[in-house]
Amino acid sequence: MKLNIALLAGDGIGPEVIDQAVKVCDAVAKKYGHEIIWTSALTGAAAIDAVGEPYPDATHDICMKADAVLFGAIGHPKYDNDPSAKVRPEQGLLKMRKKLGLFANVRPTFTFPSLIENSPLKRERIEGTNLVFLRELTGGIYFGEKGRRDEGTTAYDNCVYTKAEVIRLARKGFEMAMSRSKKLCCVDKANVLETSRLWRETVQELEKDYPEVTVSYEFVDAVAMRLVQWPNSYDVLITENLFGDILTDEASVISGSMGLMPSASIGEHTSLFEPIHGSYPQATGLDIANPLATVLSAAMMFEDAFGLKEEADAIRNVVDKSLEVGVVTEDLSGSNKAYKTSEVGDWLANNL
Amino acid sequence: MKLNIALLAGDGIGPEVIDQAVKVCDAVAKKYGHEIIWTSALTGAAAIDAVGEPYPDATHDICMKADAVLFGAIGHPKYDNDPSAKVRPEQGLLKMRKKLGLFANVRPTFTFPSLIENSPLKRERIEGTNLVFLRELTGGIYFGEKGRRDEGTTAYDNCVYTKAEVIRLARKGFEMAMSRSKKLCCVDKANVLETSRLWRETVQELEKDYPEVTVSYEFVDAVAMRLVQWPNSYDVLITENLFGDILTDEASVISGSMGLMPSASIGEHTSLFEPIHGSYPQATGLDIANPLATVLSAAMMFEDAFGLKEEADAIRNVVDKSLEVGVVTEDLSGSNKAYKTSEVGDWLANNL
Ligand SMILES: CC(C)[C@H](C(=O)O)[C@@H](O)C(=O)O
Ligand SMILES: CC(C)[C@H](C(=O)O)[C@@H](O)C(=O)O
């Protein structure tokens, strides 16, 4: 197969971890007889510095033509404590999501037996956790009208959802539930919000199309609790944009393996794959960042974007092997030898 | 002192736990020479059943005349999976908050050394945790305009904040920080929301009035993570209504002592004190519910509403003693004898 992949390395440790994923992808392609055409493009603070725009049109064109997008991380400390800065890296992220129509963010949380002790939770709470969030990514309060009135002393943000948006996301959730354990949890705040009531009634209507799926409805505050208490009681969860932002981040730390968690954003035009960790500015250029989340995002790309499951599993297996033999970066090495980011990438590519 | 207290027992286990708090308050009053005048009033599903309204005017009048309100819990399963029900217990709660002007919800999370093993978190993560959230309670997306258009297929909820609302809540936060460790964390989503930018800039302006307080600004998704990882790194946190709903519930389970966590809602007209747990319908009438959160809410009432710190400490001390000697309900008794709700209340009142 010929695979056209747009490469958006972004800021901070983005370029370093992306480099390792490229090595691994190229090794897989070679082994299975595929040809990958990589096209790099600017995004984030790197793009602001170069062309004054965090998601330039040229980058968008490259993404639109690609079969998939592999993304590193964006964000730079110089923008952090200045929420009013005119151009911000995050704007690029939001613009990209909207323009590529990346409506469903898929965020799994699972455990690696060898890393379970890294979890802040006790073993019996976290063991066996294997859940996945589907977060709506192009609607809600992120994209509603926002502004000021009364000479700037009143601020507002509108949260808006259409039934069509809910159906699109929820169908993905039902399909995912069908391919897993047939359990779906719809997370909302239907006791307070009208948008949540639309979500709930729409999902209730869809239930008849998926008679095998057992659906539960839970309030966002209750889920925030149960994720800490019994994360292994969840399987597939669907939710709107802002709740998803908060809950997927909460879920990501409970496994103790945040540095390993991949994600996908399913789009109308293309799909994007990225590690869930941030741009980790303090580690930039030090060759110490953990590349495994990006490598596992590449595995998701092979499976979900190209339908190449065997290739995806080959990547996952070599990652498991690296954990077993301890070829890992300093965040995971404990008192053993810590490998460099690039050494981990080389080892993975060579041991596929 | 003569203390006028409105008593809103509510639904489920509300009446049972409130009964124990009344016993304890009466015992404290007797010991310290106060006179308590209790006035009971209907609220929640109990009020809907009786008069068709979850927060009747008669109840409001009683609260307005009281020096403080002691509240049990509201909510009934018959309303749970019917978000479109015309009258719902939660509406009473929101109406009460608005009409009493209960603008600041104070939610501490702390640990009891003897209960630390109940936490889902490992000991080294939770030990020493002693934080308090101030959640804005009468604004934001809870109370903005909400509705449908396009024949019901589009739903919207508006989130609105005025600078005056932010100042009122934030000043309480700064004052609380001054009385504790002088650390304040402002939780927002200023990289996305205009209301959050108003929050952040307003808090930044207030900093000059409290030069001793060190203020940090964190995004809500980051706080959702750090609460699980290092809860003991926080002290006073201030935030808007919806973020507060999610984060305070998340925080409440990390201590492992949810059944013991009290809360206060500071109002323009009066203040209200309530356990943070819900109405626990399955346990209703069984005399098994843990009354300690309500008893500790009464302690907060003595200190915060009446300025009676000695009385408050007397209550807290007898609660500590009950935990030490194991006069506790089944949720805390482990393999030892479980006491009834009413037995715990009697023991506390007798041992003050
Ligand atoms: C950076 C920010 C705008 C973004 C979001 O809130 O969606 C991030 O937190 C995420 O979850 O990808
Ligand atoms: C019942 C519900 C309306 C309420 C809220 O969301 O405020 C509850 O969750 C709470 O936190 O007191």
Image (tube, coloured by chain):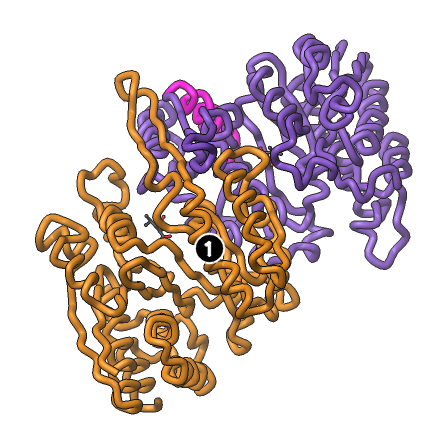
Chain colours: A purple, B orange
- Residue A178 belongs to the span the image colors magenta: yes
The stretch in magenta equals A163-182
How many marks do you count on the picture? Answer: 1
A109 vs B117: above or below: above
Which amino acid type is shown beneath numbered disc 1? Thr
Q: Say left or right for A12 vs B325.
A: right
The residue carrying mark 1 has its beta carbon less than 8 Å from ligand 2: yes
User: Which residue is depicted at the point 26% across and 56% down?
Assistant: B74
What is the x, y in percent for residue A265?
60, 25
User: Which residue is depicted at the point 61% across and 48% down?
Assistant: B217
* Most common secondary structure along the magenta stretch: helix
> What subunit carries mark 1?
B
Which quarter of the figure has residue B20?
Answer: bottom left
Instruction: Give B294 or B159, whichever is nearer the viewer.
Output: B159
What residue is pinned by disc 1?
A: B248
What is the x, y in percent for residue A74?
71, 31
- The reply to whether residue A181 is visible in this rendering is no
What is the x, y in percent for residue B146?
31, 32
Quarter of the rendering occupied by the N terminus of chain B: bottom left
Instruction: Give A335 or A233, whichever is nearer the viewer.
Output: A335
B45 vs B292: above or below: above
User: Which residue is depicted at the point 32% across and 40% down?
Assistant: B143
- Residue A151 belongs to the span the image colors magenta: no
Instruction: Give A102 or B337, whichever is nearer the viewer.
Output: A102
Q: Residues within 10 Å of mark 1 (few under 14, many from 20)?
A: many
Q: Say left or right for B159 vs A333.
A: left
B19 vs A54: above or below: below
Instruction: Give B239 or A164, whichever is nearer the viewer.
Output: B239
Q: Secondary structure at mark 1?
A: helix
